[in-house]
Image (cartoon, helix red, strand yellow):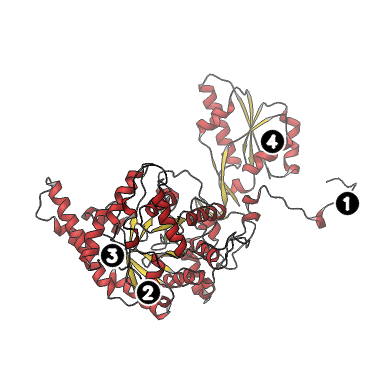
Amino acid sequence: MIVAEQKPLAEIKSMLGEAKRVLVVGCGTCVTVCFAGGTKEVAVLASTLRMSTHLDSKETVVDEVVVQRQCEWEYIDPLLATLDQYDLVVSLGCGVGVQTLAERFPKIRVVPGLNTMFMGLPTKTGECEERCQACGNCVLDQTGGVCPISRCSKQLLNGPCGGSQNGKCEINQDVPCAWQLIWERLTNLGRQQELLKVQPPKDWSTSRNGGPRRIVREDLQLPEGYRD
Amino acid sequence: MAVRAGSFAKISNCPKGIGINARGWEAVSAMAQNGYSNLEHLIQDRQFVVTGELGPPKGWQRSEVEKKVELVRGVVDAVNVTDNQTAIVRMSSIAAGRMLVEAGLEPIIQITCRDRNRLGMQSDLLGAAALGMRNVLCLTGDHQSFGNHPTAKNVFDLDGIQLVEMVSHMRSKGVFQCGEAIEGGGPPFLVGAAANPFGDPFEFRPYRLAKKVAAGARFIQTQLVYDIPRFRKFMEQVVAMGLHEKVAILAGVGPLKSSGMARYMRDKVPGMIVDDYYVNEMEKAVANIPKEEKKARNEAWKKRGIELCIEQIGEIRQIPGVAGVHIMAIEWESALRPIVEGAGLLPRPTLN
């Protein structure tokens, strides 16, 4: 899932500017699971903004709504009917959600209430870790299912750097060394010989380095004349 | 024939100042005519090789490099010139390396994957070759979070092993990483890499070295060895795999400056193991000197640090498969001469 965390209140408040009627829009998918933009977080942020703007002697109206998925037109389109009441939308969706709203509703200002962090999973209550960078050229078959692109601080493809010690990464004792994990996993599977091959330079053109990405599936596209 | 250290004696007196002087070009053309580096010839000749290290200044003054050059002249066979070491911005290794060439010394240009992509690295390497540099040490590079620009974006387009392979193919096949031919043929680089016998997973370390050899590394400089039993164990594996026959392994050594430095390296530096022996010996060196007598303590520490380094070299030389030593006297280049002399490694060989 996409993992995000809420921006500091001061930053969110500074984005409100002179807005008098604000709609906080949450998302019921990834950011609900990581406790950043679900029903509860939207309610807490909305009431905090109400109290805070009240203390600033502003009577800003702050309403709240949560859509099932902020990253698909069909889930956000019902908002259109009420949007003319507002002069600002604070999105508690990921960066995709913010842009989906901004793209669909060009007449209203949309600002982000979250910082989108990474694609990952909850490893224990209150903790999420990164697992994928969407490099567009998956190597997990070569690395025992542990991703060196997202989990090695230097994105190495040929084994651990000299800074790996006691299973930890050189940048931080809280970060496990991805290559230690890869080594252990492949050793447990009796496949460590696979790490002896020199892996050639990666083709980064499928990652963000190749420019914004797009997938076209002709088999899924509707024939001319059909409405999307 | 190799470039001889002695043949540069005259050139060492070249006038100093900004700009490239005529004698500097003499040095370059001598190197270019001879093609391969002196270090390469010494390795082929199975000499016990001694390399040192010179950190370029955190500024642009030539004099800072020139001062250090005089401290290493005639003491080592080639000198590593570091590339933004510990991710702190310094004068470029190739620019400083050029000053060494002008002064008649042989640089080993360090190049890391942190700051440049494959385009940047290859273009810099062509420039380095044109300016008379022949030895390249390929490194992954410390993470930028250690340095003075921790908010920078890192590159790591290639990893250290892929860099070794790229530079090696530039030389052997005369091609860029993309496969296109290099105009005028491949630059005659001697390709080196680093190895850390003290990193984990320990069992993988000899295999990682094997990968570097397979990628084309001809010499290896190791992390500082302050745990000789572990290094011996690593070398046993390396010799069992026959790697020492394919690559010259230079063990990393360095003089400790104080007991604080020894403790710091033991407890804080990722990828290092420092045996308590070294910490204890450095503490003992100042045991009878009061804390207020800073100068006396520093002198005692430095004296013991140099002695311990000489002792390390003596022990390491006995380990089968070791082809030389790489002495890292960090910001203490003046220690090189007493160490090399004390270890009985002077004068350095010249090839005929």
Q: Which residue is mark 3?
A: B226
Q: Do marks 2 and 3 both belong to one polypeptide chain? A: yes
Mark 2 against mark 4, which lies toward the viewer? 2
Dot 4 lies on which element? helix
Q: Do marks 1 and 3 both belong to one polypeptide chain? A: no
Relative to B6, residue A27 above or below? above
Mark 2 against mark 1, which lies toward the viewer? 2
Relative to B75, residue B25 above or below? above
Q: Which residue is mark 1?
A: A223
Q: Residues within 10 Å of mark 4 (few under 14, many from 20)?
A: some
Dot 3 lies on which element? loop
Q: Which residue is mark 2?
A: B45
Residue found at the far top of this picture: A57
Please tell me which residue is depicted at 62% across the width and 63% down the height of the picture: B179
Q: Do marks 3 and 4 both belong to one polypeptide chain? A: no
Mark 1: amino acid: Pro
B226, A39: nearer the viewer: B226
Chain ID, mark 1: A
Question: Quadrant where the C terminus of chain B lies?
Answer: bottom left
Dot 2 lies on which element? loop
> Is the residue under label 4 in contact with that under label 1 (CB below 8 Å)?
no
Name the spot of residue B51 as percent of width and height, x first.
Answer: 33, 63
- How many angstroms separate mark 1 from mark 3 (CA)? 71 Å
Chain ID, mark 3: B
Mark 1 against mark 3, which lies toward the viewer? 3
Name the spot of residue A11 as percent of width and height, x first.
Answer: 52, 32
B346, B328: nearer the viewer: B346
Q: Which mark is residue A102?
A: 4
- Viewer can see residue B136: no
Name the spot of residue B258 as percent of width and height, x first.
Answer: 21, 54
